[in-house]
Amino acid sequence: MRNRTILAIPLLLLLVGCSLFKSKPPAPPPHPFQLGATATLGITTGIPVIASTKLPHGFVPDSAVPPMWLAEDLGIAIAGSLNGKGMVLGLSGPKLSHVTAIASDHDSGASAGILQGVAASPDGMELALAVAEPANNRLNIVLIDSIGNGESHSVASFDGDYDVVSMKWIDHDTLAVLIYPSAPPAQIAANVDTVGAQSGGLYVIGITGLGSIAHLDRIPCRLGPLSFSPNRRFAASAGGAGAAPAVVDLQNQNCAQIRAAAPVKLLGWAPDSSAFLYAAANDRGNRSAFRYILAIGRSTLVAVSSKSVAYASDGTIVAMGDAALSWKRIAQAPTAPVKAEIALVNPQTAQITINSLGFQTPPAILAQSTMVFTTASDSAAIDTFVPTSQGPVRELIDYSYAARSAFVLASGPARGPLSMSWSPNGLALAIVDGDASRAMLTVMVPPR
């Protein structure tokens, strides 16, 4: 390992099969008048908006990286590109109106390299960057302090060229890095001072004190992007790039394959680490949500034609879909509208409570919906679509598990990608939408 201090652009202080019980359906989500707007949507009147910031002209947000909350909720980082150049923006100050470049390709903040990944720690105190240096045939893992002077330093360095780079924080002191080389190991020059130059794989980096690096080199399967269990004993692998989906026992370094087409979309772990949720396509291409139970080593179906599924803080599964929908029904009438509902599934009793969302949509459109859930307030932000004679309309719906109620936060014609994330306290929702001509960060506070 090479551990060396590098220069960085200063990061400003970020100040700122089961029994069914149906409950009485609530009223459909209300649609009040709209006055404010994101880059593409009208915001429901009365929703408090605490930030509405236009991003630099030409900046294209990376929709695969949700807004990253930094410095105890008071700053946000956004990944994307500007004129084809990878960049991470920091928004701070009153109403998050101060925009600066934290790091970008080919400058001091990225160590004269190319950004290949970015991840914010759970407490938002550090921002991890994966930076490829083609001139030196090296990959650096760099940490930037999101408060104070925005100092940066390298915590690991790997010789070689890597086409698979994935980072995930296990907790606020531990970063997991998954890398695989572009060339066969025999073609990578050996370097005894550099960790992992030969084989790649999964590395666990401790960032406190003198730091530490552990290479889990006995895991027998190739891995994809990972989601770690709350007890840190297991990890679910999405698969992809020649890797089958799998669940990994990190303690014993073994893995069990999940019978699903790669890659799957990992949706979250049960609070007790006994199971996790994922979305995968069946042999007909229909994407549905499943629950993998570690004790029995197999998956059960949760929701057909939906990937909007999550665990609440008490272990209840919150799933968007239609309780009466089946793969057979989709095959017989693929374009017939289905009811949009929220199912609350108790994994222990197999009891299901259904809440209606008050609209219908075809299964294919339902499957495009996404859900971002926060256990801090047990709230879901749902990005969904409703067909109309003028084309599909996008609706952002806030669903409160505690209140069993839904509210439309914003709506408008479906235009381009959108990403969103909850603040650590689960009270504010950050939304990034738009394109190179007009992209915005909007932070709002859903009703409670």
Image: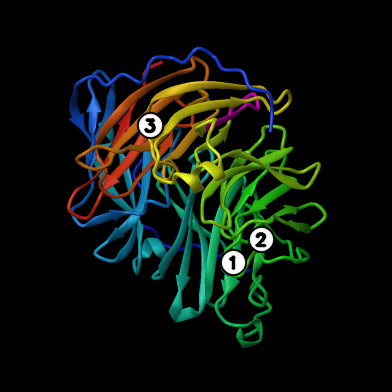
Is residue 30 visible from the viewing direction of this image?
yes
Residue contact between numbered discs 2 and 1, judged by CB atoms under 8 Å: yes
Q: Quadrant of residue 197?
A: bottom right
Q: Which mark is residue 179?
A: 1
* Pair 2/1: label in front: 1
Q: Residue at x 69, y 78 (%)?
A: 192
Q: Give the range drawn in magenta.
A: 312-319
Q: Gap between marks 2 and 1, in whole Å?
A: 8 Å
- SS under mark 2: strand
Hey, what amino acid is under mark 1? Answer: Ile
358 with respect to 226 (left or right): left
User: Label 3: which residue?
Assistant: 360
**Residue 439 image position (x, y, % from top left):** 23, 47
- Image-based side of 33 in relation to 356, left or right: left
Name which of mark 3 and mark 2 comes first in the sequence.
2
The residue at the point 67 percent across, 66 percent down is: 222
User: In the drawing, what numbered circle is on residue 203?
Assistant: 2
Location of the N terminus (image quadrant): bottom right
